[in-house]
Image (spheres, coloured by chain):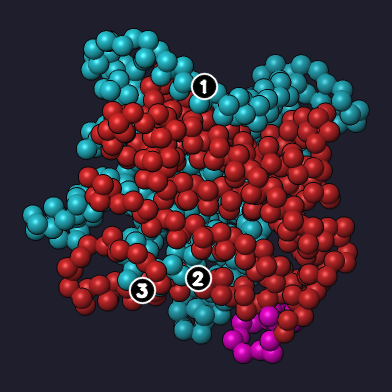
Amino acid sequence: MEAATADTKIAPTRAPRKRRTAEEDERRLARFMISPSLILIAIVAAYPIGYAVWLSFHEYSVRVPGLSRGAGFRNYTNALNDSAFQSAILNTFIFTAASVFFELILGVAMALIMHNATRGKGVLRTIVLVPWAILTVVTAITWQTIFEPQLGFVNTALRGLGLPGGNIVWLGDKPYAMIVLVIADVWKTAPFMALLVLAGMQVIPNDVYDAAKVDGANAWQRFTKITLPLLKPAILVALIFRTLDALRIFDLPFVLTKGTNGTNTLSFEAYQQLRENRLIGLGSAMSILTFLIVMIVSFAYIRFVGGNIRGLADEGGR
Amino acid sequence: MSDGPSPRVVGESRSVNGAFGLLAWVVGLAYFFPVFWMVLNSFKSELDANASPKLFFHPTLDRYRDVTKSTTGLLSFGEAFTNSAVVVLVSTLIVLTLAIPAAYALAIRPVAKWRDVLFFFISTKFLPVVASVLPIWILAKNLNLLNTRMALIILYTGINLPLAVWMLRSFFREIPRELIEAAEIDGAGLKGQLTSIILPMAAPGIAATALLCVIFAWNEFFYAVQLNPVQGSTVPIWVTTNISTRGDFLAKLSAASVLACIPVVLAGWIAQKRMIRGLAMGAIK
């Protein structure tokens, strides 16, 4: 059954079409298995997107609820010329790059530790999940108290140890606010990465390691030459989902900094206009622009990196 | 600890392993510190919790008593936990029921334009949540689903489905094709293949996926507060009712968060046992 390759472009060259009907049946079955999920996604995703697009091309009366008129692209030009929105684009990309990068490193390290620990493996695996299990609002408040300038744990510890930085107003100064934001996000979501990577590690066959052992590969070589390439599919899935969430980050800056000191993000700006300023048209335009930015990033990701998801799995088809 | 047969590389020198294990514990504990801090706060008085950090204080269970007895809000502790449990479990079950066949089709059965299908799945994650709340609220209102568990069940299923499909697909792809073909030759139908090979072999992946869905759904706040502000509302909403604009609330909030975390920790404990590879691939071949 060569035709079982998921990519249909490859399938015909590989498989002689001896049983066309069987293949047709397979295809129909596959479609049948996917469609319930696709329908649900269409309802949950497509409707809000269409609605937001419609809103973004109108402007609304602040005084008379429901009164609106067409605005053409005015909301979009206003959004793009808004300096707060421009800085939000930059901040969002800085935040996403930094947090996803550190989450990946920490997540893989955590997964390795959990995978290789000799004692208390079960406890370790459970404990590590806890930061992720805490509500973001609570996480944000906890970090706020830890980084509080006067009584917070960080500054108290820094001063007590005589280290520099004990007087930094962490959430009130420009580069530091973003640093705290990244720390809080990495701390919270690294377990997500670790869990995905750890699960990926479970499907790596033992004999691959044994063979490498025989060949005299040391631990680092085994990690870079065997573990990492085999983990790539799991890591890629974790990376894209983390990137999508990081690009739309809202709750952390909302609670931690209220978007001040260089921490306003795309979702935060959209929220400001939609909820605080009641500028539905402008806020929707910002949401759709965010939507487009996230879509372009994902598209590029699937095009350039995602090709490897399949390629790897096919080559690795032991 | 029943770790099962250790998949770890054998024959490494003992001291290296010992050092590695120690490192694991140190990192784990450092990482765990903020959680430890939160647990400590939950046993403090509000005065101690908001004072400068100190390790010794007079521990009290009063905060736990405060948060579990329903007072101010309409949402009680018991109600919130029941609602959350129902919403989380039902939505996770639906996600798995929908995602396993879809991921199987995408991974193993020929699906035309699989790349577009995968892309379509993540399109739910492009729009800022704040922008989708209003249309979803209107939709829920028109369908008379406001303040019902059903609204959240549908929503959380939709939110978790993309990740579940993507994850499960990547795990299903790891299963050696020859095993499935062998089962096919032996005359196993689709059901036989699923139950005898695919599900057992991908069990760690499925356990991880289920755990992710549970945690996401358990912690979801934004939609829950908009769609179910009072009735049918969930634990995160209950936790935040302890945040007050007047007076100190850190100790109370900590106690509520600790309680809210317990079910997740339990779920994690159950799932991680399944995540030790059920059927080692090497053993089959």
Q: Position of residue A182 (x, y in %)?
A: 51, 56
Secondary structure under the numbered disc 1 in the rendered image:
helix
Could you tell me which chain the residue with mark 3 belongs to? A
Residue at 74% over, 40% down: B150
The answer to the question of whether label 1 and label 3 lie on touching residues, with beta carbons closer than 8 A, is no
Q: Which residue is mark 3?
A: A119
Which residue is tagged 2?
B32
Foreground of the two, B261 or A264: B261
Chain whose colour in the figure is cyan: A
Q: Which residue is mark 1?
A: A32
Residue B40: image location, x then y, percent? 62, 79
Q: Quadrant of the C terminus of chain B?
A: top left
Colour chain B appears in: red
Are dots 1 and 3 on a single chain?
Answer: yes
Residue beneath the point at 37% across and 53% down: B278
The boundaries of the magenta stretch are B43-59
Q: Nearer the viewer, mark 1 or mark 3?
A: 1
Asked if marks 1 and 2 touch (Cβ < 8 Å), the reply is no
Q: Residues within 10 Å of mark 2 (few under 14, many from 20)?
A: some
**Residue appearing at x 46%, y 70% in the figure:** A123
Q: Main secondary structure of the magenta part?
A: loop
Q: Amino acid at mark 1?
A: Phe
Q: Quick one: SS at disc 2?
A: helix
Looking at the picture, does residue B87 appear above or below residue B242?
above
> Is disc 3 placed on a helix, strand or loop?
loop
